[in-house]
Image (spheres, rainbow, N blue to C red):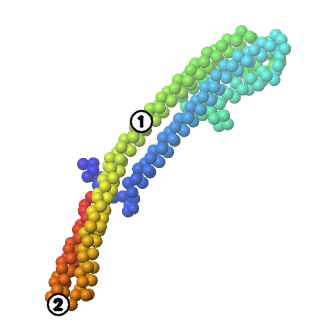
Amino acid sequence: MIKKHLSKIKLPKGFNNYYLLVITVIVLTILIQSIIQYSLSRQRQDSLRINEAGRQRMLSQAIMKHVYECKYGTCDYGKLRLAMNKLSNANIALQKGNEATGIPVLDNEEIQENFNKMQPHLEYMLATLDDFNNIGSVDMEKLSAETDKFLVLMDTIVGQFQKASEEDIKTLMIIELELAVFSLLILIFEIFYFINPSIKKMAIQNQKLKEINWHQTHAFQSHMKNIKNYNHVLKIEKNTAHKEELISFLMEELTDLEGVSDNMVKSLEKQA
């Protein structure tokens, strides 16, 4: 049934089935490479996001360290301000995305909910430390409690990012496997329904050429040789009766030669 329908498919004149196979291989290679490149790009984005989320925990702890130093020892306000800015900017980038660093926009509602829960604790930290002149009066117990809550939620978010990344990788692996199987099936299909018939056709054509070659090298040349010999004898023969006999032989050779020619034509016209 399938072969019957496929036989009705008419390819452009001069289009070889091997071209179809080559084009299919090229298309499938491009498709597989595109999936692989997309997979690598997603993994890179996930790695950047997880790394940035992990740095948030480090920055929050660094801020507390600087606050303790400012309150009870020597203070480096520059480092404290830098850590606060990095914490704020990274928090925005993890949610809104950042083209410069390659972090995509967050599209996970569950993770976004935890960011929303974490936002009040972050805002308290940044608002409390915004004015360095009031660092001496900061409630360290309250600030430490807010920082701890921030850390707990950020740990949860990092875990969610990691889980989402692993799920993406599994999904892409399944897609790549399905695409590989699909590609293999297409290649087998083409080989069975297109390439194999072409090979059979070539074998038949080769057999035709062998038959034609046999007629050419044996029968055809043999008759031509006989015709030349009779023709030569006719030129030198004086006896009229003998000439008529030679002419009859020559006509027989011509008739046989015509039969050889017909056989050569029939060989070419054989159906594949």
Q: Residue at left 27%, top 50%?
A: 3
In the figure, is residue 34 to the left or right of 56? Answer: left
At label 1, which amino acid type do we have?
A: Glu
The image quadrant of residue 250 is bottom left
Choose between 199 and 106: the one closer to the eye: 199
Q: Residues within 10 Å of mark 1 (few under 14, many from 20)?
A: few
Choose between 217 and 272: the one closer to the eye: 217
At label 2, which amino acid type do we have?
A: Thr
Choose between 212 and 10: the one closer to the eye: 212
> Can see residue 82?
yes
- Under circle 1, the secondary element is helix
Q: Residues within 10 Å of mark 2 (few under 14, many from 20)?
A: few
Total count of labels:
2
Q: Residue at left 72%, top 21%?
A: 126
Residue 79 picture location, percent across and down: 79, 22
- Under circle 2, the secondary element is helix
> Can see residue 212?
no
Cα separation between marks 2 and 1: 87 Å
In the figure, is residue 17 to the left or right of 89? Answer: left
Residue at the spot of label 2? 240
In the figure, is residue 223 to the left or right of 136? Answer: left
Residue at the spot of label 1? 178
Choose between 131 and 62: the one closer to the eye: 62
Residue 146 picture location, percent across and down: 67, 14
Q: Residue at left 63%, top 25%?
A: 51
Residue 116 picture location, percent across and down: 60, 23
Q: Residue at left 61%, top 25%?
A: 50
Residue 71 picture location, percent across and down: 81, 12
The image quadrant of residue 260 is bottom left
Q: Point out the image quarter for the C terminus.
A: bottom left
